[in-house]
Image: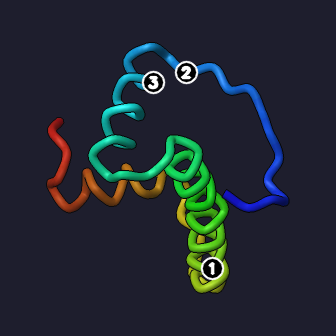
Amino acid sequence: MSTKSKRATIYFDPALHQALRLKSAEAEQSMSDLVNEAVRMLPAEDAEDLAAIEARKEEPAVSFEDFVRELKDRGKLGD
């Protein structure tokens, strides 16, 4: 753990806490390292989502009603 790390109190659901403890022992990593790794993934996933949205911004928007109507017209929905 870095000397620049900040301390925080986090409350886990008991089952999640047990799973984290077991994973920590199995991986031979501290619980803090595992939590940091998991939290680090959150903004990375957001960045991927934002990139996907940016890449698709020129695609035409389709309303829900039009989408359902198209599915029905193609026989993908029942009567």
Q: Amino acid at mark 3?
A: His
Counting every numbered tag in the picture gives 3
What residue is pinned by disc 3? 17
Which residue: 43% across, 52% down?
29
- Mark 2 → mark 1, Cα distance in angstroms: 32 Å
Residue at x-position 33% and y-position 60%? 70
From the viewer's perspective, is residue 66 above or below residue 15?
Answer: below
Q: At which x and y percent is residue 32?
A: 58, 44
Disc with the residue nearer the chain's start (2 vs 3): 2
Looking at the rendered structure, the secondary structure element under dot 1 is helix
Q: Earlier in the sequence, mark 1 or mark 3?
A: 3
Front residue of 6 and 64: 6
In which quadrant is the N terminus drawn?
Answer: bottom right
The x, y position of residue 56, in whole percent, is 58, 81
Q: Which residue is mark 2?
A: 12
Mark 2: secondary structure:
loop
- Of 67 and 51, nearer the camera is 51
Q: Are marks 1 and 3 in contact (CB under 8 Å)?
A: no
Structural crowding at the residue carrying mark 1, measured as other residues with C-alpha within 10 Å and reported as few (<14), some (14–19) or many (≥20): few
* Cα–Cα gap, marks 2 and 3: 6 Å
Among the two numbered marks 2 and 1 on one chain, the one whose residue lies closer to the N terminus: 2
Which residue is painted at 53% across and 64% down in the image?
62
Q: Is residue 25 positioned above or below 57 on the image?
A: above
Q: Which residue is mark 1?
A: 51
Quarter of the image where one finds residue 59: bottom right
Real-space Cα separation, disc 1 to disc 3, in angstroms: 33 Å
